[in-house]
Image (cartoon, grey):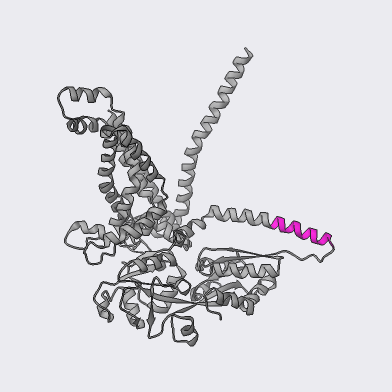
Amino acid sequence: MGVTDFGTLRFLEREKMKSNLIGIITLAGMTLLGACGEQATADGTEAVEEVEISVVGSTTVQPLAELLSEAYEAIHPNVLVTISGGGSSVGVKSAAEQTADIGMASREIKDSEIQDCPEIVIHTIARDGIAIVANPDLDINGLTMEQARDIFAGEITDWSEVGGSAGMIIVAAREEGSGTRSAFEDLVMDESLISETAILQPSNGAIRTTVATTPGCIAFISFGYLDDSTKPVAIDGALPTPENVNAGTYPVVRPLNMVTYGEPTGAVAQWLQFIVGEDGQAIVAAEGYLPI
Amino acid sequence: MTSGTRRTGLEKIMKTVLLISALASVLIVLLIFVFTLKEAMPAFREIGVWKMLSGTTWRPGNGEFGILAMIAGSGLVTLGAIIIGVPLALGTAVFLSEIAPEWIVRVVRPSIELLAGIPSVVYGLFGMVIIVPLVRMIPAPGNAGFGLLSASIVLAVMVLPTIANISEFAIRSVPRGYKEGSLALGATKWETISRVMIPAARPGIISAVVLGLGRALGETIAMIMVIGNSVILPTAMTDNPLSIFLSRARTLTGNIAVEISYATGVHESALFATGVVLFILIMLVNSSARFLLKKGAQ
């Protein structure tokens, strides 16, 4: 557990001031790159056109996209991928309004979003499971989907109701607007709403700390954050593991998407091809996500 | 003659420079308020000011934007911090100014100043790992440790340096004659402190408390980490009305910090509106401090 775990810090990172700063640094970097390019031409090598790809959206996809862009830029030095966060909704909106080349979304694209802009094209680049985790001292190993739903809705309030020893259930969840929360709502909650009395924490890391230190606590986190400090709970008999996702037995899986306005062309299309290709998917798997 | 002209010239330039610096802070406050208000206007227009202020449900996904629960959360946590923090701070101030020998003052005062320098995220971490488990031991149904009490305790420690420092200064500023006169009349040391020194320093102490109040209202990160962030109107959990402090809550500042990174459209605007409400609350607190100070001085 580290201080950097907390989403509040991530919020600070995203302040507009900082994004301005990033803009300036990017600009400076581009000028530098431009200078290098000119030199290359003077040496007689073929001049390659500089291309910039702007990517905006989900903070779940962001770290993965950064790794994918670094790997791609290493092979194609003329391409510069600039990535910024903002959340899945911002990602879809930016692509639809063409303010960014690519929007990132860590959930299914909503029908309403497709209705607003039918031109958007969805590219699934990886999948991510959402695991239900409980405090390690609990003597509960599995739940059915219905039980999980009722627990998070606040209808089941004691562990004895689901086969554990008596004790109050404390529900923790992500804040409204989080991609992990909305994916969990879609995949598990159905029409029910997550209980209003749930402890809300603004990041996967903070949720993990809360579950690890609070007796009787249950919550959901991205597969990438699973470790020994919390106890993974099986749903309908399937533990949250990549093997069970691939076998189709673990049900809570969401796609990580890249969204473009219309079919992508040029550098954008080439980068997306790289991501879904062998090298890109190897990075996806290495980072603990599930390849497509 | 020439040096005289030069001097007046320099005087004029400096006067202008100083005036500009003074106006800059006024301008900045004004700009921040105007900008926040401008961003908040769509929410006020679409949702309605009264509906926002009186609504208890906050579900941006369903278009419900009531911030009453957050106003109550901010109010209660500040109240709790003042109840716990003020006696502690006042005790520290009296001890340092009237009772402690010089060498103790030299040890205690820097540690209080150090307390003021600890980043709030560290307070939050401390609260999450130490205070929350302690509060959880209080037997009450639904008590998870995260809530108003944990937040109030953390906040009380955070406002302690502000209140203690200014109160100590206020007590030290009481004219020597008051104290000597009281002691000469045969009052004991405690009587002198409680009946003469503290009443005489009251305006300073009140402004210290109000400044602490303003600091408490604005605290964000440490609160997010220990208060639970649930959007509910805090209610008592047992027959004891004090158990309201075991309830989870969300503060106005926490509401902005937790959700701004994902917010768009009306949701984003509603968060700016939360900021406007906070701005006005802090303005009210600060102007009441001025009023009390003036009244105390008369």
Task: State the residue at coordinates (38%, 49%).
Answer: B218
Q: Is residue B78 above or below residue A223?
A: above
- Residue B222: x and y, percent? 38, 54
Q: Is residue A206 above or below residue B100?
A: below
Decide if residue A87 is on the left or right side of residue A175. right
Image quarter where the C terminus of chain B lies is top left
The answer to whether residue A39 is magenta is yes
Question: Magenta residues, as a range?
Answer: A30-43
- Residue A105: x and y, percent? 52, 71
Relative depth, front residue between B61 and A183: A183
Task: State the residue at coordinates (32%, 80%).
Answer: A147
The picture quadrant where one finds residue B105 is: top left
Q: Residue furthest top?
A: B1
- Residue A238: x and y, percent? 41, 84
Magenta span main SS: helix
Relative depth, front residue between B111 and A159: B111
User: How many labels sit on residues?
Assistant: 0
Q: Is residue B220 visible?
A: no
